[in-house]
Image (spheres, grey):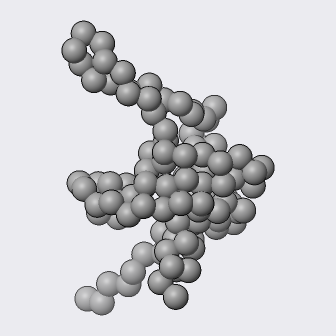
Amino acid sequence: MNARPIDYRATMAARVGVAAGAGFNVREWKPFEKNTLRGFLSIELPSGMILHGLTVHQKDDSRWVGLPAKEYTKNGERSWIPQVEFASKAARERFQACVLAAVDAHAGEVAK
């Protein structure tokens, strides 16, 4: 059986109904592979706002974006509080599709 590579950008973008990338630009990318982690990035949104401290993860055929979080300790236990959140699952999926498309485009530019 001949397996074809999965085009994550097109698949996710089609699923959430957005153009791949939609004006998102990777400002900084630091590859770092450990467990599901694939790297750290800063992303510029179409509005001009820049988000730092995002992470890209992959496990098998699933990829996702981790949002910035602040670490704190309570009763000796480490925990994190989100610094950004979305009003809906659909909004989160659109954002993730755009960020992953921008990461893929950036990887393609770096490879040239």
Can residue 86 be seen from the camera position used here? yes
Give the image location of residue 41, x and y in percent: 49, 55
> How many numbered callouts?
0
Rendering quarter of residue 30: bottom left
Question: Viewed as shown, does residue 55 lie left or right of 15?
Answer: left
Residue placed furthest toward the top: 75
Residue plotted at (48% across, 62% down): 29
Which of these two is toward me, 60 or 14? 60
Question: Viewed as shown, does residue 15 lie left or right of 71?
Answer: right
Give the image location of residue 38, x and y in percent: 35, 60
Question: Viewed as shown, does residue 77 lie left or right of 20?
Answer: left
Can residue 11 be seen from the camera position used here? no
Rendering quarter of residue 18: bottom right
Give the image location of residue 100, x and y in percent: 52, 61
Residue plotted at (33% across, 60% down): 32
Give the image location of residue 39, x and y in percent: 39, 58
Q: Is residue 70 above or below residue 12?
A: above
Q: Is residue 62 above or below residue 105?
A: above
Rendering quarter of residue 75: top left
Which of these two is toward me, 13 or 82? 82
- Quarter of the picture holding the N terminus: bottom left
Q: In this view, does 74 lie above or below 70?
A: above
Which of these two is toward me, 15 or 71? 71
Residue plotted at (57% across, 73% down): 105
Which of these two is toward me, 54 or 21? 54
Question: Viewed as shown, does residue 18 lie left or right of 41?
Answer: right
Residue plotted at (39% across, 80% down): 5
Q: Is residue 79 above or below residue 56?
A: above
